[in-house]
Image: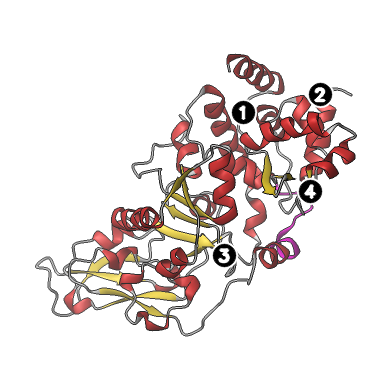
Amino acid sequence: MSHREVYQRLAEWLRIGWWPLPEAEELMPLLLLRYTPEEAALLEGIPFLPEKRIEELAALKKMPVEDLGPRLDSLARKGLVYRSADGSSARYRLNDSFFVFLRSSFWHGRADDLTRLMAQVVNRYFLDGFFEPYARSSRKGLRTLPVLETIHEPRNVRPYEDAAQVLEAQEYFCVATCSCRHRKNLDPDSPSCKFPTDNCLHFGDLARYMVEQGLGREIARRDAREKLEEAAEVGLVHGISNWRKGIDTICNCCRCCCMWFEGVHALGHARSLDPSNYHACLTPETCEGCGLCTRRCPTGALRLEEARGEAAHPARKVAALDEKLCLGCGICAYKCPSGSLRLERREVTIDPPLTIYDYVIDFYQKSRLPQAPQHGRREGPTWHGARARQDSAVKEG
């Protein structure tokens, strides 16, 4: 079997997962960069869920446990396979293409030649169809987590909307490099981002996996709390796993790099993150017209306009709010010097799915496309060029 056939078979297997892996000219070069031919052949047929004991996978692959175990452990360190411990036996499952290409490839924060090339190809593929399934989805992968200090009446905040309660419910924490900002910063065709990257928070089993495989580092609960405070201070939006039980991620998102905001700004999707159950409220009479909120708002929901009555600012400019665009993140209110902005609960409360499995089923039913529409092509790495760069990177270490 040729190498091309090996990669084509892997691509077809990856499409069995929850993410449909749309066809595009960047797909094959990307597979070449991320998987060796031997890895591609081994991973075809490895189940996504449930996790399997090494003995079961050895029988599936017709390999001795002592040969397969070290190979799967190596793939777990690359972020291609998920590994967990079950007593004396290890369990494994295949990581899906969304997880591999948009998350585990960049969590480690490295800036070697292979990762730089990966970033360029992933960024092209993102615009060339990879993210298209989310154009029709009824729910996004992240839901806006409001800054608690900005909520007018915090007593009735639901547990999944309260960052303090979310963190209190966790037992294990890690932080990784923001994969979105890192891949953008590594790409010479993308503008560099001014925001910090060391603030991608993860919890529970996912966090343990990431720390064990060198994809993140363990932190304490108080460190996670400080990361959220620092993110709110500089104007990053908290985005939390879009389900209620088993929350494993809080991202801190910027509008320039975040995949969800890029879906809106670059691909024309209707929504970025799903909004919180809150929206901003403005008291124009006390607004000082400083414009800080308009600069911090990630969706353009706030703008400055001429004041109609008495204004606190001598230039008679005040903020104006378009509630339809508001995510309910509270980033505007968090730094408002006059206290003219706050978050209030929306009239209709929308709960996210109960578990990640409910979320995936909902996504699969409503968003899976037979083939993503093809967007404008840009010349990218060729099959042979990507193959040569990968071989060179492997030889170098």
> Label 4 sits on what residue type?
Lys
Q: Is residue 217 above or below residue 74?
A: below
Q: Quote the CA–CA distance across marks 2 and 3.
A: 38 Å
> Label 1 sits on what residue type?
Glu
Chain-order first, disc 1 or disc 4: 4
Q: Quote the CA–CA distance across marks 1 and 4.
A: 40 Å
Answer whether labels 4 and 2 touch (C-beta < 8 Å).
no
Per the rendered image, the range of residues in magenta is: 363-374
Q: Is residue 364 magenta?
A: yes
- Identified at 12% across, 73% down, the residue is 312
The total number of labels drawn is 4
Mark 4 lies on residue: 52
Mark 3 lies on residue: 242
The residue tagged with tag 2: helix, strand or loop?
Answer: helix
Give the position of the N terminus as an image quadrant.
Answer: top right
> Label 2 sits on what residue type?
His
Mark 2 lies on residue: 3
Of residues 60 and 157, the one drawn nearer to the viewer in this rendering = 60
> Label 3 sits on what residue type?
Asn
